Image (spheres, grey):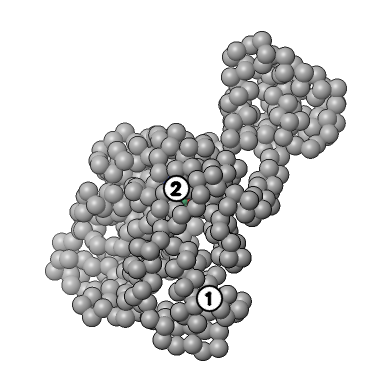
Amino acid sequence: VWSNCLEFIQDNISPQAYTTWFEPIKAIKLDKSILTIQVPSKFFYEWLEEHYIKLLKVSLQKELGSDAKLVYSIVMDQNISKKDPYTVKIPSSNKEKLKPQELNAPLHLESSKVKNPFIIPGLQKIKIDSQLNIHFNFDNFIEGETNRLARSAGKAIAKRPGGTSFNPLFIYGGVGLGKTHLAHAIGLEVKEKHPEKTVLYVDMQKFIQQYAEASRSNNRNDFIHFYQMIDVLIIDDVQFLSGKKGTQEVFFHIFNDLHQRGNQLILTSDKPPVDIQDMEQRLISRFKWGLSADLQAPDYDLRYNILKHKLEKDGMEIPEEVIEYIAKNIKTNFRELEGALNSLMAQSLLNKKEITLELAERALVTLIQTQRKEISIDYIQKVVCDYFKIPLEKVQSKTRKRDIVQARQLAMFFAKKYTNASLASIGTQIGKRDHATVLHACKTVKNLSETDKVFKGYVDDLRRKISAE
Ligand code: ADP
Ligand code: MG
């Protein structure tokens, strides 16, 4: 079975990748539809899972049917002692080795429990697992027009954490646009350039959960002390703090303390600070202290470059025209882009067909259609409001102020262009107008964009944003 799989795999990746990653594998057991393979190390296993899982899955299913399962057996490297990533060590006279559950490490650092009275919490150097994913590094983070600012701010911070005016760095943008990846990349580079710094990545949901547990067990101070010891604190998806009053309070406290001492904060969110609902004003204003940088939907070049990079990394080759086709049609975000590529490869493997433009067109047709459908009237209104920096209520209201009327007309124009909604329904949804108003709006926009250069600029910008061209 395994040799059939290998043959199949060999046909689908570069010879070099095959020699490196598949030749060293030994098949050791087959039990019904469960195949056990032996791999030389944990790293090897992680690499396979990260890069070749799709290929393995498809090839195995072909041989063993849809119940096929793969079990890895890892040859233990004797030289590497088993390291518990969550073990906190305090390298000082306090030799006690503390083994917290998960990241609740802070709970063991309460000053009353620290035996040596000369250890001042906040000054002792601790070693913690930074929780960073080594695959999300800068080498893998492709630069483009739409992420340049955020990326270069990140680079600057990695050079001088806490030493730039980008504190906090607030990275925001829609789903799948690279916030998490960039946040990890900054952390990794800080560690590389400044090994003495304590870096911690945590997502907001985990932070909230940790705090809830700490409060329940009366360990609130330990929780705070722990976070106060971090030199570079990266918190992903801070929008989850919305509505969490108690956690906002403690986060405010930690934020101030770290910031005051010149420690670096890096925050990500799916929306800009002002748009986070149910968030204390004092926190929102702090989020804006440093630099807010957004990640926008990728343009064609970036989408193309990312596909190229990913193919190269995986040792795959597909025709140039197919890469261009995907880059041209999958516009929303990187997750969709990777998904498209993966599903295309899976289809080609399953059907034993070469990847051609024709196959790509067929394989991706549904994906491309659902993408188009996602443009809703609500979405269009939001983009227009964002663009002109005016609140949605204004567009929805009866006001006849010139700039608002213009935004309203543009929203109507694009709603007509990109949705199947009728004039009447567009009118109802954009501020309760009738269909004649919408019709008039569409004509006005059309005329104006032919005569007014500035206005035409707006229309082009908005079209690009709405359709993620
Ligand atoms: P977000 O956190 O904004 O939802 P992620 O950081 O999880 O997005 O990114 C989604 C996927 O796209 C990840 O696999 C990530 O590695 C990839 N990705 C995002 N931005 C880039 C980039 N600039 N270059 C290469 N890959 C990227
Ligand atoms: Mg994310």
- In the figure, 256 relative to 383: above or below? below
What residue do we see at 60% from left, 13% from top? 453
What residue do we see at 51% from left, 49% from top? 319
Say which residue label 1 marks.
60
Q: In this view of the protein, which residue sits in the foreground, 246 or 194?
A: 194
Residue 279 seen anywhere in this rendered image of the structure: no
Say which residue label 2 marks.
308
What residue do we see at 21% from left, 54% from top? 195
Q: Position of residue 335 (x, y in %)?
A: 53, 51
Q: Which of the 4 quarters of the picture holds residue 158?
A: top left
* Amino acid, disc 2: Lys
Q: In this view of the protein, which residue sits in the foreground, 330 or 199?
A: 330
- In the figure, 26 relative to 433: above or below? below
Q: Position of residue 49 (x, y in %)?
A: 44, 68
Give SS at disc 1. helix
Q: In this view of the protein, which residue sits in the foreground, 118 or 137?
A: 137
